[in-house]
Amino acid sequence: MAKKITSFEIDQLKEITNIGAGNASTALSHMLGKKVQMTVPESYVGKIEEVQRNFGEASDKVLALFLKMHGDLEGAMAMIFKPEDALSFMEILTKKKKKSLDEMDELDESSILEVGNILLGASITALAKFLDLNITHTIPDMTVNMLGAIMDTVLLEIGSDSEEILAFKVNLHFSDDNIGGDIYYIFDPAASGIILKATKEKVK
Amino acid sequence: MSEEIHIKTAELVVSHNDNILKSGSIGSCIVITLYDTKKRIGGMAHAMLPHRKNKMKNYEVKPTEAKYVDEAVDNLMKGIKDMGGDITALEAKIIGGATMFKKLSGDKFGIGYRNIEKAKKVLQSHKIKIEKEDTGGSNGKMVEFNLANGVIHISTNI
């Protein structure tokens, strides 16, 4: 980063991701008719290897949905579920109980991808609307893999040019049974600059 | 007494005796190991990207730095040489460079693919033979390198 990002700016970006995640949680709540809680965003900012070290140790198996944002800014979003949470989601959606992620069939896969598409899409639409930016996104892709390995791939997809990264994590879960997942927003410094500038315009 | 040494992202360790070098879980990153089979001196590097983009003037690469494939191999060779190893008789193994999101990154030209290609090229330029490779695919891996016998153990949780 040519100019070091200040903690005030990080707080601003957290607030923006909060708006996005808030819309994702409303979408989830409407879709399934359950109360949804969300946490305050956590931020991971710095050189790509430093951010990766925060996740790199994690060898837990998880299910990840990943999509890229294009348009006025480039970025990515990911949604990470623990296997048991992913299975619960699929059970709610397909009304069929599976014992493990290895038993996932096409219907399970497309149902969880659709959840990702709706939640992450709602979140991005909210961001774009709030910031008056034009942001489109790809359809999500899915993998079942180790968290650390997924995060290095995700961070490198966005940060391989700038080598600096800003990642924000929000946890969404149902209030009654604690099933949920983590949403990650990932931006490079250029995208963060665009968001901060658009925020400034907005609050002027 | 053998010791387990954990290698962080973008770092490398060179060691000997019966020590075991361990990586974290790697996706499109790449783990490169070099081993002097006679003296049983070896090293493991966890690189993220093929090469440095903007070379700063007078920038000296730290001996523990392994963020870029080319510098990682240089540093591994230097470390092994400093420990008394024979860098003309090294065997290499490379692991990683996975592509997890095929729809988004494509099979070719993704970071994982570029890391693998770069590692092969750099090792070839140093005339180091790649003894084994477990690269590409769509799964993350963890690597353990036993310096007592040069055996690499690769595991995953999927």
Image (tube, rainbow, N blue to C red):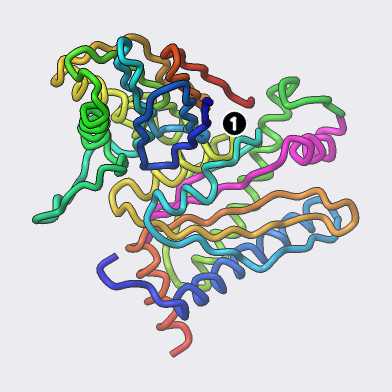
Instruction: From the viewer's perspective, tell me whether residue A83 is left or right of residue B25.
Output: right
Q: Which residue is pictured at 32% across the width and 46% down the height?
A: A160
* Quarter occupied by residue A65: top right
Is residue B118 visible in this depiction of the protein? no
Residue situated furthest bottom in the rendering: A204
Query: Is residue B134 placed above or below A3 in the rendered structure?
Result: above
Q: In x, y percent, where is residue A119?
A: 65, 52
- Please say whether residue A153 is one of the residues in the magenta stretch: no
**Which image quarter is the C terminus of chain A in?**
bottom left
* View extreme (right): residue: A176
Q: Mark 1 points at which residue?
A: A145
Q: Check the image and name the residue furthest to the front.
A: B1
Q: Could you tell me residue B64's position as x and y percent?
A: 31, 43
* Magenta stretch, residue numbers: A67-96
For mark 1, give the secondary structure: strand
Amino acid at the residue labelled 1: Asn
